[in-house]
Amino acid sequence: MDKKTAEASRTREEGLRCAECGSTNVETRLEKQQFPYGQGRNTVEIEASVPVRHCLQCGFEFLDGAAESRRHEAVCRHLGVLTPDDIKEIREAYGLSRAEFSRLTRLGEATLTRWESAALIQNAAYDRYLRLLRFPENFRRLQTGQQNPAGVVVSMTAYRFRALKEEVARKDQSHFQLRKRVAG
């Protein structure tokens, strides 16, 4: 493992099994670990406090999904974006399922699942959108279809493009023909 510093606390958690021998005699200790994030010149070292599992039966040490979640959260904090738990809290604060939240916000349900399960980190634009949804007044605007505080509803059906008559279109298209340049 990379640079690590073990913290003093060691705990035993129910349901953990050693990945090597299958024993349930596993303890957990938190270690501060540094890991690289990014590529090439953009690589940075990020630090996270991750749970390291230690089998008291066979001595095997391993990391699991909990460690990956902690690393993911550390990357989110480094990037300045909401963590998976933050995103889930926004949705749950309004009492919505992923499907309901997806319909209302027009975000894909699969995308929400990826963000909430730490399979993917949202980009800065989506992060800002999610942060705006933390404010109940913005959420209410989505629910009511309002686009501004004055209550004016903007609908795309209000904008209609007039159709050109065929003879007008043929006459106008002659102005937009490509011409071969003659070398002079």
Image: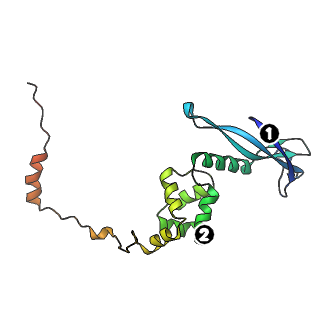
Mark 2 secondary-structure assignment = helix
Where's residue 96, x and y in %? 58, 71
Q: Residue at x 86, y 52 (%)?
A: 11
Label 1 amino acid?
Thr
Q: Is 43 on the left or on the right of 67, as rendered?
A: left
Badge number at residue 93: 2
Where's residue 74, x and y in %? 66, 47
Note whether 149 is above or below 47 in the view shown: below
Mark 1 secondary-structure assignment = strand
Q: Is residue 22 visible?
A: no
Q: Is residue 135 visible?
A: yes
Which residue is labeled 1 in the image? Answer: 5
View extreme (top): residue: 184
Where's residue 146, x and y in %? 40, 72
Label 2, residues with CA under 10 Å away: few <14, some 14-19, many ≥20: few
N-term mark: 1 or 2: 1
Where's residue 98, x and y in %? 57, 66
80 vs 94, nearest the viewer: 80
Label 2 amino acid?
Ala
Badge number at residue 150: none
